[in-house]
Structures are given as C-alpha cells and as structure tokens.
Amino acid sequence: MAQTSLRMPVIKTPSNLKNWLGVTPFFLFAILFLALPSIYLVQGSFLDQNDQFTFQNYKDLFTTPLIVDAFKLSIQISAVTAIVGGIFGFLLAYAITVGGLPRSLRSALITFSGVASNFAGVPLAFAFIATLGRRGFLTLLLKDTYGIDLYQSGFDLYSFAGLSAIYMFFQFPLMVLIMVPALDGLKREWREAAENLGASNLQYWTRIALPVLLPSILGAMILLFGNAFGAYATAYALTGGRLPIITIQIGAQIRGDVLHNPGLGYAMAMGMVIIMAISLAGYSWLQKISERWLR
Amino acid sequence: MNLLSRFRKFSFWSWVWFILGALYFLIPLYATLRHSLRMERDVIGFRAYERAFADPSFLETFLLSNLLAVATIIASIILIVPTAYWIRLRVPEARRITEFITLLPFVVPAIILVFGLIRIYSSPIGIPFTGINLLQPLTTTKLGTYTLIVAGYMVLAMPYMYRSVDTGMRTVDIRTLTEAAQSLGASWFVIVTQVILPNIRSALLSGALLTFAIVVGEVTLASFLGVDAFGPYLFLLGQHRAYEPAALSFVTFLLTWFAMGLIQLVTGGQGQAAGAH
C-alpha cells in the first residue's frame, strides 16, 4: 500500500471509510434483492402458524412424505445426470484435447457446449418432445426401421428416465467446458517422463493423469449435481408439474400453500439452499486441491 | 511430433465419443426442425414459422423479453463496472466479500429467489414498529413488477457479469489509465465511461450476451411474477399448439447459438484456450 501511495501522488488518500462508500450501491443491491429475500425465508422457516419460534418445520421436513419424496427424486435425478453426464462429458473433453482430434472439431464442440449448457427450459423440453415423445422423430425411427418400441419397453419421456435424458443435454456440455482447461493443464513433461520410465498408456492414465485430474472431475460433477438440482423450468415445461421434484413442489407452494403451512414451505426452500450450499462448498474445496497441479 | 503420432493411435475412441456426443446434440435439433417444417400434411414448408410470427402475442412477449434483457444488461453494467473498478483501485479488502456475494446466486436458484422476492415485495415495505410505509408493494404495479424482475435477472446474471468485468479489468492496467486520465483533469464519471468502459468492451460484450441468453427465454421468474415475457408465452403455446412451439424453439436455439458465437468471436476463444500456456 505504501508503494502505491508513492506511485500515485495525484490521488489524495482519503479515509478508508470514504473508499468503502464507493461500493455501497452494490452492497445495497445485494441486500435488497438477495439478502432480504433469503433472510425472509430463513426467518419464516423458524416460525409456526402463530408466528412463534419453532424448530418443528425442520423436523417436519423429514417426516412429510411429499417433501421427503421430492428431495429423494431430485437428488436421484441430479446424481444420475451428474455422474453419467460427468463421465460422458469427460470422455468428450478428453477426445477434443489429448485425444488427437482435429483442432477445428475442438472449437466447434466448445462453442456448441456453450450454447447447449445455456439452452434449457421450455425450448429444450419441446425439442425432446419432438425427439423422444410418443410421436417423436427418434421414437418413430426406432420403431419403423428397427422394430424397437421404446414406449412398449417401458420408456416414457415424462418420467425419471425421460427427464434425465433431457437434463443430460445441458449437463455434459457443462462438464466439457469445465474439463477442457483441466485436461489442457496436464503437462506434456509428465507423459514424457512416464514413458521414459517405461510406463504404458494405461499406467500413465491410472497412475498419473487420473489422480491429478480426480479433484477437478469430482468437483465438476458436484457442480453438475447443483446445476440439475436447481433446475425448474425444464421439468415444469415437460410435465406441467406431474413429476414431483423439489423445485416443482416449491413452485406449487408459491402458487398456493399446498402444504397448508407456510413455515414448512420456507423450511423446504431452505433445505434446498443448504444442499446447494454444500455442493458449492464441495466444488470450491476440490477446485482448490486441483489447482495444486493444474494451473 | 513424435508424441502427436503416438496420440493418433488412440484417436479411434476419441472419434467414437465425439460422434456420440454430436449425435446427442444434433438429433433433438434436427427433430425439432423437422417437426416445425411439417405443419401441412405431406408438404415441407415454413407454415409453422409464418403462423408463429404472425401471432401478435409473439411479437409483444418477444419484444418485452428483449427489452427486459437490455434493461438488465444496462443496469448490471451500471452497478457492476464502477464496483469492480473501485474495488481494484481503492478497496481491495472488499474483494473477497464481493466475490462471495457474486457466487451466491449459484446457491439460491431462481425458484428460491422468486419465492423470497414475492414474499417480500408483495406487501408494503415500511420502517419496523412505526407504521410508516416507504414503498408500496412492487407486485401491484406494472412498473414495480418490471423493476422487480429486472433486479431478479440482475441477480441471476451477476456471477457471469461480475466475472467477465473483473477478468476484463485484470488485463488492462486500470491504475495507470486512471492516473493518466486524472492528470489530464478527467472526473470520475469521465474516467469510468470514457476510459475504463472502452478498454473492457469485449469482456462487457461477452457478459452482456450471456445475460441476454439467460434472460430472453427465462420462465421461472417471469411466470411467478406474472410478467408476459417470451418464456411463459412459449410454455402456454406448447399447451395447445403442436407445430408453432417447435418452430419458436428452433428460433430460440439459433438465437442462443448466435449469442454464444459472438462471445467466441469477441473474446477470441479466450478462457477456453488455456492450452496455450
């Protein structure tokens, strides 16, 4: 700091408080539109029907079947799409970085991943109805050409499997976007050193590359989990609320008090925030670990 | 080069993954396009597009969504650029807390945000224990609702906008620029608008385009706040039409593509080109 004030004779050094004044609009905005709404939900989650302080709402979270089922379903869908999307996204990122594909494919896939990870909600649901719905393009193609009837064999777009297939469309592109820089961070010297010591390709991957990449892979998968966990519009557009994941239930609670207990509704929202916070914390922790090797 | 040729050996599986991925991306898009072109029996044509564009509600909602996007972008720039600039220049100790705040929207998803916003701003806001009302409920007037939704969108876009702006400022020496401008007698307003802004324009543009992509098709905030934006309109259209929604979905996709393509162009693939070092 002393150095900077030497370098800047023109600028007087006003009091520290005055400097903080410059960032007050931002903090005011954050308080009005981020902190206050959150505090309202937190506060409401500790109040019973008569506005008395209670922990009951949080206890009820674990005993109300509607809420338990919604959390379970959301966690399952998010976990499945995070793991499958994560693995597939990693393989794709591998293919375009160290996998030896032409450079042009790499930039095409990265741009496309940017598009796909931002292409969610209503249009995405419609795209999949046109693809895998009962009269969808792929459904009919498989039926007419190969004699495979998806819907006879138990598949339904408006179900767990269907929603997972749709979520995958924005899940694995996100994985690609996160993993490409990590894979680029693998140093060429490590591979050369391993090979000079007589390591096979498999040994290089299992002993060197994967251990180095593991924190980023896990961190990215956690991010994918949160990404799916907070999604609302896609599921709503697809099923109109028939697939009771947690965001759909919260939506129903906002529209009309379906739980007949506002406090329980706020606790349900807080439960979601807590899970999101844990995943973000897990992500940044793993991110820090992976930065030790990959810069 | 020897290394490269050794990689070639394994590129069979790379091709397999790439082709699988490409199919997963492209088949739904192809199916949507195909569906949207078949409104008339046995004829391939743009009938669904004509119908969709001819609906006056389409134009209204689409225009509104674009206006909301522009409002969000301008308001975000006004809020975030001076903040990020000031933090870099004068209050580096505010950096951690600010970065933490800009990450919060990842923890508070849109559905929770709108839950809290509705509960707070649908009743009058007053000073506690005094009975004095500072603000009428925002959700009862059109202007109030628009203010609320733009604020909500600003929150959703904050992580992306702040990061773009902050990264943009890292690459220019704002301290020297500020000193130079000050020695020429420029005011703070002139410094920010005529010195700092032009220097981070590609970062601003990519933040703005990302915000645009988020806002234009947004459904959650719009439908709960009762704003007749494009997202809720498309959703309703899907309830009772078959072909027009497919057409508009495809158009939305092209728009997203356009925005992302522009980002690639203005940033020169920066951030993704980490392999360069």
Image (tube, coloured by chain):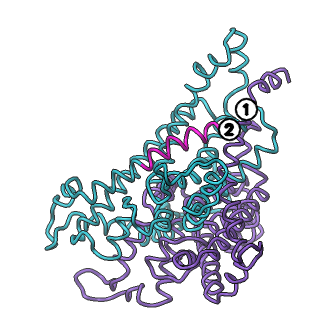
Chain colours: A cyan, B purple
Q: Identify the subunit bearing mark 1.
A: A
Whole-percent x, y for residue A112 in the image: 70, 53
Quarter of the picture containing the C terminus of chain B is: top right
Please name the residue that numbered disc 2 is placed on: B17
Q: Identify the subunit bearing mark 2.
A: B
- Contact check, label 1 and label 2, Cβ < 8 Å: yes
Q: Which residue is at the far right?
A: B1
Query: Which residue appears at 72% of the width and 48% of the height?
Result: A109
Please name the residue that numbered disc 1 is placed on: A99
Q: Nearer the viewer, residue A116 or B235?
A: B235
Q: CA distance from mark 1 to mark 2?
A: 10 Å
Whole-percent x, y for residue A114 in the image: 66, 54
Quarter of the picture containing the N terminus of chain B is: top right
Q: Amino acid at mark 1?
A: Gly
Whole-percent x, y for residue A258 in the image: 27, 71
Q: Nearer the viewer, residue B44 or B265?
A: B44
Against B45, residue A154 (above or below) is above
In reply to whether residue B264 is colored magenta, the answer given is no
User: What segment is highlighted magenta in the picture?
Assistant: A77-91
In reply to whether residue A86 is colored magenta, the answer given is yes
